[in-house]
Amino acid sequence: MALELVGGAFLSSLFQTLFDKMASSEVLDFFRKKNLNPGLLKKLKILLNSADVVLDDAEGKQLGNPHVREWLLQLKEEIYAAEDLMIEICDECLPTDIECESSSRPRKVMGFTLPAFSETACEKEIEPKVQEIIETLKLLLEQKTHLGLEETSVHNGPYNSQRLLATSIVEESDVYGREDDKEKIIDLLLSNDDSGNTVQVIPIVGMGGIGKTTLAGLVYNNDRVSKSFDVKAWVTVSDNFDALRITRTILQNVEKSGSQAHDSKDLNQLQEALKIALNGQKFFFVLDDVWNKKYNLWGDFMRAFETGARGSKLVVTTRDEKIASMVAPNVRPHQLGELSDEECRKLLAKHVFCNRSPSAYPNMEVISRKIVERCKGLPLAVISLAGLLRAQPDPKEWERILHADIWEMPNNGDVEILPSLWLSYHYLPPHLKRCFAYCSIFPHDYEFSKEELILLWRAENILAIQKGQSPQETGEDYFNDLVARSLFRRTPGLIYVMHDLVSDLAKFVSAEFCLSWDEYNSNTSKSKARHLFVSTKISDIKEFEALTQAKYWRTLLAPKWGMKSSLLSVAQSLRVLSLRGYPYPDLPDSIGDLKHLRYLNLSSSQIKSLPDTVCNLHNLQILLLSYCRLLTRLPNKIGRLINLLHLEVRMTPLVDMPDDLYKLKSLQFLPKFVVGENNGSSINQLQKLLHLYGTICISGLENIVGVGDIAETILKDLKFVRELIFRWNGRSENSDLELERVALERLLPHTDLRILKIQGYRGTRFVDWLGDSSFSNVTSISLEGCRRCRLLPPLGQLPSLEELKISEFDELERIGDEFFSSSTSSTIVPFRSLKKLNIEGMRSWKEWSLTRAYGEAGVLPSLTHLRIWKCERLVSLLPGEPQQQTHTPFPSLETIYVSLCPMLETFLEWGSFSRLQSIRIWGCEMLFALRRSWDLQRCTSLTSLELRYCFDSSVGSFPEEGLLPTTLTSLSIIGFEYLKSLNGRSLQQLTSLESLFICHCEQLRCLPEERLPPSLSFLRIHNCPLLERRCQRENGEDWHKIDHITRVEIRGEYIML
């Protein structure tokens, strides 16, 4: 049965982009004004349509027929050539009202030379080029019958991501059939190695897609494993065994504070630093996806681990048994086998039916069982198919997938393409296919963020913008779809990677047009490359000459690379240039000659300034300058970049903004605006940038030195901005109080704001708009370092406020009714949505002072999380007095954390706390002294209690009988300086207790004679030297008191499992 595709071929999206450009007013006007033959465009479109109808059949047959694949590649090359030509014409037709100051002479900067290009396309060459493309297309179309290509019907309806996005993205923990494997690896990690080696290497071997990385991840994140080692680190190794990078990554994990050694490019220096850092440390490292077979590289690499403690472990995952034997010659590798069909069915059901019973879909359940058999026990195959099946909830489509020809096709050449992955790709809509294929530019195991990839897609103009959506929103929909289809895999920290087999699929689809170039494929032909990722240094002139074969670059990504002389001499078509981590302080002036450039990434580079000629890049849409630690100013004429949409300057120490920034009328993203010294009026430029969205941090507000510096309501019309940060720097003693208030008054935001942060405000009172109920969409507010303010604004009037942080109000002594409402007669429930309240560093705050009645709802009726930290004069945690019946404090409270409040006396003595589940009390001396008045028995849902840093000499025994509620399942006693004994009778009353943690109680002598509660399943003792000696396995004096406990951990090591 021939494969009928729902999505359509990858080239279809290229065709549509080309059709749009051919029909654009720029191209049509250019042909008319230059007296060119418009009939050529008509002929070109007819030929492209003729090719389009056989694309789906060709794409399905290319795996089994290399001639069809070659035909597709030639067709793609002609489409790219036509698109290049149309883009050239469109760029020539852009407005010419921008002054261009390009240098006619190349300038050499630190070995990096850029050419001076011609300014206009050669009009006489347009017609011959179009005619040449037409003739080539005719020849290609003549071959389609000989190749057996047939016209197919493609369901190319409008793209709708809603159905797919309605399901949840599967978490990494959703694993089936690996419990035994996991336990075996954990046993090896926790067992003692009798070989006498400091480090035991544990290899995990299995074919691609079998789940080696997933298994290693399960073990790496296991609590028992984590607590058994002093340090751990994960490194993805991939094809290139870069000992320098691997050692640096491990060192950064071991020395989290960082050091100069981290930046060294000398392997010996890094290894010496790592030896010092690991001295006496018991470590656990994972080296994932190892391909290196050179024993000398492995031996040199392992020398750095000699100083670690006995029992250190190193897990290595690899597909190759020979590599497993090399890294662990005397250890039998753990062979990871295929899943059973039953386990695969469970995995598929989890991903497709989203925890609903497959029996609810009887027709689909039968088909899914047959599809699972096709996966041959490979988890990656199951998961990739699940994403496809979830997007096609029609039994007929499932039948087509089951009987697709691809299951029977042989592999093509050296590339192993899983049929399930190929089907997942085949059923993508055309625009998603192009976005996925673009990712082939990344090398194996390359880590990318959602934002990074979306910006690249935008710059390449491969997003089909949906009506009513911004490019960013469309990009996010595409990205989320590819994640949901398991083509992208999320790692910790919102970073994503593609599995090697998925990456191979993308590289197969894009063929020679997207190329990741490094020392392993330096011989690959680059003449057709449009998109190039350079991940190695070019040290040989022949390598450099080979690289310059690519004459039609659209993308060049060269992170952390100092470029060779004249590299961009062939880069006239370049649209995307990434020099992230560029190691030199200057860029050449001639970079301004890259007239088609839409994307320039200089993030994390060493540049000190940008040349003014950057402002000649009038096509530039995206300029990334984050983490440029030496860059303090932007070019003065940046306003000439009239097409700039995205200017990223986070974590770059800018001291001011250019005076013509306001000319960037199309600018949408500007996360930071700095008001410069002696240039306070520059802030008024913001009122002209009406398309800004997302987050803006406005810093340097102390540089507004006069009322005339700031216009009224400069932010009110920025209706797409969702988060605002206002930041004053420096001391506040000599500030003009009236000026501070006026400045904040004129920073009035649009009422659709969601998040507001005010930092370092130097006035004594806030303005009226802060807390006004018209800001009904505000969900989060943070007021920090407003040291002179004595009253809080009426934030209780904000109906949607969910999170609130208040810190470092040095002169505020009381929180009163004004915080809840500005009106004494209001019937609105104050803070009706507030769930999280964080109050910290309030050194003068003494009390709540509420006089009004707050009705049945109570004070802060929705509050679930309360954190109070370092409020040194606070006496009472609760508002009001117990004899008052005017309100109930915090009726919905679930967790409370109180720390470093030495004068706190009253805690939870009145009110109802039936929902309270967790309490943490740190360093509150007076509160500990009055602990008998806590009355925690009223907290009927309390399960977790952590008490830390008690320096009261009267606490020699703890806890007193009746002090703690019987509902507790977890109890932590930490830093009790004078504690000598535990009250056994009291602990026996805790009949639900499952976990007990005792730490830094250096005078604690022994466990109670009454033994610990029988319900206890986990006992952890750390830094209690007297007690630790008595709890040694078998021969400890207190061993008989704990031998019934399932898990016992003494000083980081498990002695019972």
Image (cartoon, helix red, strand yellow):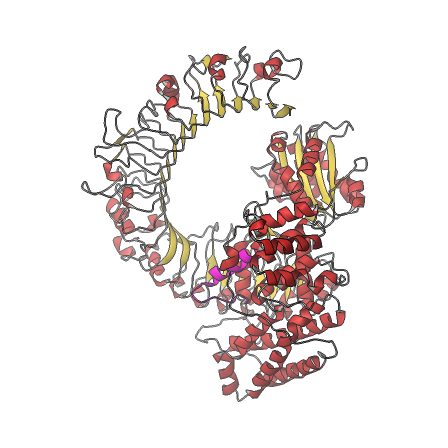
Quadrant assignment, res 734? top left
Instruction: Give the residue at x 57% y 37%.
Output: 256
Q: Nearer the viewer, residue 908 or 560?
A: 908
Where is residue 1041 drawn, in percent x and y? Answer: 59, 14
Q: Which residues are magenta?
A: 462-482
Q: How many marks?
A: 0
Q: Quadrant of the C terminus?
A: top right
- Establish if 777 lies above or below 455: above
Task: Spot the residue most to the left.
Answer: 825
- Pinpoint residue 720: horizontal percent, then vertical percent: 38, 58
Q: Is residue 977 left or right of residue 688?
A: right
Residue 938, compared with residue 563, is above or below; it is: above
Instruction: Name above or below for residue 845 compared with residue 443.
Output: above
Q: Nearer the viewer, residue 538 or 103?
A: 538
Q: In this image, 245 relative to 938: left or right?
A: right
The answer to whether any part of residue 326 appears in the image is yes
> Could you tell me if residue 535 is visible in this image?
no
Q: Per the image, is 465 magenta?
A: yes
